[in-house]
Amino acid sequence: MTDLQHPHPALPHGGRGAHGRRSRPYVGSGSFLSCCPFFLITLCAALPAGAEPTTITLWHAYRGGEQQAIEESIRRINGARADFQIVPVAVPNAAYASKLTSALPRGNGPDLFVFAHERIGGWAESGLLMRLETRIDEAELDRFFPETVEPLRFDGSLFGLPMSFKSDVLFYNTSLVEHPPDTTDELIEVASRLTDREAERFGLVYEVASFYHHAAWLHGFGGGVFGSDGSVDLETPENAASFAFVRDLVARYRVSPEDANGALVTEMFNAGRAAMAINGPWFLGEIGDDVPFAVAVLPVVSETGLRGRPFLTSEAVLVNAGTRHPELALEAALALTSDDSALVRALEGRQAVANRAVWSDPRLAGDPVLAVFRAQLPETVPMSNRPEMRSVWEPAQMALRRLLRGAATPEQALTSAQHHFRILTRPSPPEADPTPYWVALALLAAAGIALLWRRARASGVVHQIRGSLHAYAYLAPTALALVGLVFAPFVVATGVSLFAHRSGEWTFVGLRNFFWILSARDFGVTEPMSFYFTLGVTVVWTAVNVALHVSIGVFLAMLMRDLWAPVRGVYRVLLIIPWAVPNYITALIWRGMFHSQFGAINDLLELLGLPEVAWFSGFWTALAANICTNTWLGFPFMMVVTLGALQAIPRELEEAAAVDGAGRLARFRHVTLPLLKPALLPAVVLGSVWTFNMFNIVYLVSGGEPDGASEILISEAYRWAFTRQEQYGYASAYGVLVFISLLIYSRMVRTVTGEGKA
Amino acid sequence: MATVELRNIRKSYGAVDVVKGIDLEVADGELVILVGPSGCGKSTVLRMIAGLEDVTSGELLIDGTVVNRMSPRDRDVAMVFQSYALYPHMTVRRNMAFALEVRKAPRAEIEERVAGAARMLGLEALLDRYPKQLSGGQRQRVAMGRAIVRRPKVFLFDEPLSNLDAALRAQMRVELARLHRKLGTTVVYVTHDQVEAMTLADRIALLEGGVVQQFGTPDELFHRPRNRFVAAFIGSPSMNFLEGELVRDGDHVAVRGEGFLLRTHPDRLGGSAGPGRPVLVGVRPHDLRVVTADEAASFETTVDVVELMGWEALLYLAFGDRTLVVHSDAAPVSGLEPGRPVRLAVAPEQVHLFDAETERSLAAPVETPSPPGGGPGRG
């Protein structure tokens, strides 16, 4: 899912490492494998010291060349040491961060792990990382570039040893660009020459809407994320100037496509339709063998004279504070970052290693690509490792997207970003006293049990149950499964909704979460991201979808009914296929089709002479795109239900109606439809509940664009839980509210149709 | 009120011919019954008149207009289906009003007509019930009410009584007759029950194998059947058949077969009836008399089974290798025991003669170019 907005890239593109291979299918089960060494360690610890070398586990997310390189360097280290042996574990990088976050606090994690520096702040605050400055000699740090060591410091302590560094550089196609531009004016000039929009060739292609890649310009214009007092301050004139520059790249000079994702950048560069690109070392592994390219340091911003400075990521080895072998783990870490190991990684893994001495090795000197990364290093700004940084991504990216689709000026975009940031980092609600809740719960439970008991006694249910005990025994496994898989999580989630979760801390806050959500505390009621707005969107989404599903499904079923049988069979299969294809695949395909510049839908509109539509830039168009996709997915179900129900309607009734004088439409309205209702009604209820909670389509197609306006309740809850620093309590409260809404809805349906006629 | 005309109507489903050339004329206000065994094509003909099936070839006229291409709703016919086809989700009132509502008739008129039909059929108390709350007979009447309300040109009935029990059927037959007399609308009625046909129809079209075997008044079909099939189908119990040949008997022509010699009547002979011609003799059970003395042209049979049914009796008699059925009053035959010899006689004019090969009646065929009396039939 490379085109998802990744608001806080540990490594952009999910940390593929320098060679950036795409995630392979699940390689090894991290938790299972991590258990084995754990048992080994306990075993080893039980043995008398010195008898066997201690196993030190190292987690990493490397692939391909980098993986081979680190395994080779570990082999050499292990060969030379008798006191410990490093065991590397490759973890799939999509799950890496969350695996660490869940394993480290419980002492289940590795002794060492390789990670980008950006999460250090959060982990250090949670006490998960070992402080190193007291245990090692400062002289040990001399061998590293200081730029790679600084990001590993937090709160006065050092938390890791640098292994390699990554940043954006300028990639260019040497057959198109002779001499890489050194200033932005040159960049624009070169790019303009090489842009031919008709042929879909662009001078500069990069993920313009990604805040990570925007960093070069942000810093080049003298701006930055943090203000002079150390707090996040996005609303500066320098930042606005950088935003204006990017907007001009897209809208004025028109040398960059306005909405490119990673896959598009790769595709265009490899097809020779992108003269230049801004990307990091992972891009190297994606460039086709037949594309002649070179890299260069990013240009100087002509307006300010400052060089464009991208974010620096320092990939380091970090030590788990809960490791059982602190001294040996540290020794292992030092060995991994020794100059010898670094050389192996540089030569075999083509990493831009943090060790200075390695760079003078003649074998490395001949690599022009690595040399550029080395040259870019002094012109980088390390991503802040403070926990607030993680909350900057979502607002900043939203601001960029609004800017690029012309919905805001640079100043407006940054102001809203700051506002958004403030809300995401607001402190949790004050702790509440759980006593009244316990009392209420106890009373409810007692009342419930008493009521049930009385009813059971009165209706003789107990006697009945005793009489058919074995029947209940047969039902028990299913009931247990239901309890375990449905009821228990539900109860737990309801419990969680009474807490607030911040950086690993749980605070009991009672009903505050609900109060905050329902009182639209953070956002105006009519603003996106307010519960009521999202509820409204969800209701509209559900209603329109179900209406379309039913009408299209019924219409097609009526058409198919009169077809010749073999033809009907063929069509039935064809029309089921949308339903049968896994819906996330469908969603991604449709998303691609709705792309404003390269999508098939706009191509079709162009062909028909109609104006192109920027689908995800407007609320109604984004909603329409989502609805279109979901309808394509949903109508087969209704069609099949209707086909079945139609079989049960005797032909004679319609013949009688025909003779009585009813035309096609009247027959349908007065005879067929009323008789379809008993079958359609449960289908409609089911369909509306499913659509209400249709996370996949909303998340994957529009992704909540624009600015979260097309989110529905369930995708909003997801974001609170998984993209906004694990605010599980708040998200659970959303979930409970969704449940309550659906409960009310199904009650309403029952009342309305309960007294319905035949 | 209208006439219905079928001119050489054919219906095929692919290679299968179901209706093979039918010519019928229904006069204005007449009640014509299409009767025949299952599969004879009568329902198909009815559905073609309604417009629910296409006519493969031939012309169908209603009230003088060719309606082959007309949709059912424009033909102004009302149909009562065998299963009544009542709309289950509508009340009786709405069922009856539906056709008028669809044609956007004014409310007042709808209510008036529905009330009128309900009164005629005794449905007033049931107007607000749903079909599933009605008995079979009640549903049948609602179906008729639905048709009556429309005041169409033609009523089409598709075996409306076959889903009712015997007693109800008899009762409804009478009601139908009364209705027809009252309304005077042209009716085309399909049934497989010849008793219904005989009692209700002004004229009967007896179909078999997709062809009209005979089209005439019940009287004609009963007394002057055109062929063996008609003779066997009409009348219950069915006619007795014997093989024989025509012979000279003095100045008369008689028919001789194994064990019998019967006199014939000139009416039954037709023109070219020469001696030596092999024939099929048909005698109705009712026309066979038990005779005590040795009458001329009587023959001997042996009693097999005696069924006494109160005033009447059915006698099953063995004759050669066949069984003859006699329908008589109970008194003369009550004492007969199985095995007893019994002599039977029949009046010459009641001896039906059919050509042994073609099975056609030897008597001159009765043509009915126009209906008898030219008006609504007997009540």
Image (cartoon, coloured by chain):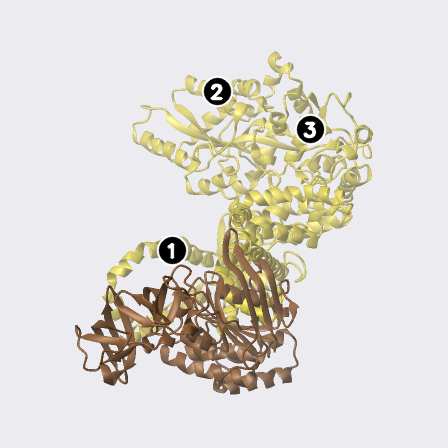
Chain colours: A yellow, B brown
Looking at numbered disc 3 in the image, what kind of residue is underneath it? Phe
- Circle 3 residue: A269
- Residue A482 disc label: 1
- Of A601 and A715, which appears nearest the observer? A601
User: Mark 2, chain letter?
Assistant: A
Earlier sequence position, callout 2 versus callout 3:
2
Relative to A305, does residue A570 appear above or below in the rendering?
Answer: below
**Circles 1 and 3: CB atoms closer than 8 Å:** no
Instruction: Give the SS element for disc 3.
Output: helix
Q: Nearer the viewer, mark 2 or mark 1?
A: 1
Q: Is residue A105 left or right of residue A22?
A: left
**Looking at the image, can residue A11 be seen?**
no
**Looking at the image, can residue B240 be seen?**
yes
- Residue A352 disc label: none
- Of A399 and B307, which appears nearest the observer? B307
User: Mark 3, chain letter?
Assistant: A
Instruction: Give the SS element for disc 2.
Output: helix
Report the residue that reaches farthest toward the top: A362
